[in-house]
Image (cartoon, grey):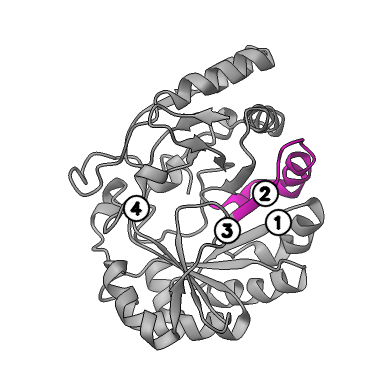
Amino acid sequence: MLIDRFNRRIDYLRISVTDKCDLRCTYCIPEGFTEFEKPANWLSFADIERVVGAFARLGVSRFRLTGGEPLLRKNLPELVARLARLPGVQDLSLTTNGTQLTHFAHQLRAAGLNRLNVSLDSLQRECVQTISGKDCFDKVINSLQVARKAGFEQIKINMVPLPGVNTDEIEDMVAFCIANGFILRLIEVMPMGISGRQQPYLNLLELIKNLQPKYHLHESNRDFGGGPAKYWESLDGSFTLGLITPRSQHFCATCNRVRMSVDGTLYLCLGQDQSLALKPLLTANCSNAELETAIKQAIDLKPEKHEFNERPEKIVRIMAKTGG
């Protein structure tokens, strides 16, 4: 087991396979941003497989592929298949904006991908275009139906409520998720990079006070993927809502995850700068023991908590650079 200095068990690794994205969501990548990592510096599939194998041997069982937009990485289903075969990998999921998912959903499911999170911030075409910078609404909606047909039973919709932009659509999104059997996750904006800091966030703890009686929601103890969301379920089981509240009620005391960027840098916290570069070790063809020792040393760097509220200006790297 990986246990950090604050007695938290680390059992979840999020892996960025590219920091590039085909959208420019207002809370993520600044308009005109071009400082993406050069492909020559990306970890190869073999390197990613080695890192995941090492984490799995250390007791980590949950892995998520992210970006940027991970489906922009060429031959991603091949990587999924390689990771799914590794001993100790019990849960393998992917976060996507949905623009490419129609083309890959069946391949990903066949390769061994367990679950999907799909970003969808509005059910209005114009609003989606305003937030994402592209008219991609039809692609995303179609991809959700294709993913269901491909055999993905658990599909989560990630929605970032932005005051004055899409917060009036939350109940419409609830109805959409009930009708389609999707899990809805509402996420407070994280102040990462200039784009994130410029966005006001909606306090989701206040929101749940209104949604709870209307949809007969009760707190759930079920495991929906081991991430940071706190889940609520309707009494009849027709609807599940997850709230991710890094601003109104942080969950640092129970944080169980670390992130690896596309260049092999382990980030120990979204809201802090502690990190450890694994690529030099991999390039030097380190032994498995050396790789595992480096991972343990990295976990010792994990801070107690972020400072999103106290020092929102602190993190200058954008979310896509860290890994979503």
Answer left or right for 245 relative to 58: left
Q: Looking at the picture, does residue 285 appear above or below residue 18? A: above
Answer left or right for 144 relative to 228: right
Residue at 51% from the left image edge and 49% from the top image edge? 68
Marks 3, 4: nearer the viewer: 3
The amino acid marked with disc number 1 is Asn
Is tag 1's residue or tag 2's residue first in the polypeptide sequence? 2
Residue 125: % across, % down: 46, 81
- Camera sees residue 124: no
Looking at the figure, which quarter contains the N terminus?
top right
Label 1, label 4: how many angstroms apart (C-alpha)? 31 Å
Label 4, label 2: how many angstroms apart (C-alpha)? 32 Å
Residue 239: % across, % down: 54, 79
Is tag 2's residue or tag 3's residue first in the polypeptide sequence? 2
Answer left or right for 255 relative to 137: left
10 Å crowding of disc 4: few (<14), some (14-19), many (20+): some
- What element does badge 1 sit on? loop
Quarter location, residue 103: bottom right
Label 3, label 4: how many angstroms apart (C-alpha)? 34 Å
Marks 1, 4: nearer the viewer: 1
Q: Is residue 225 magenta?
A: no
Please name the residue that numbered disc 1 is placed on. 114
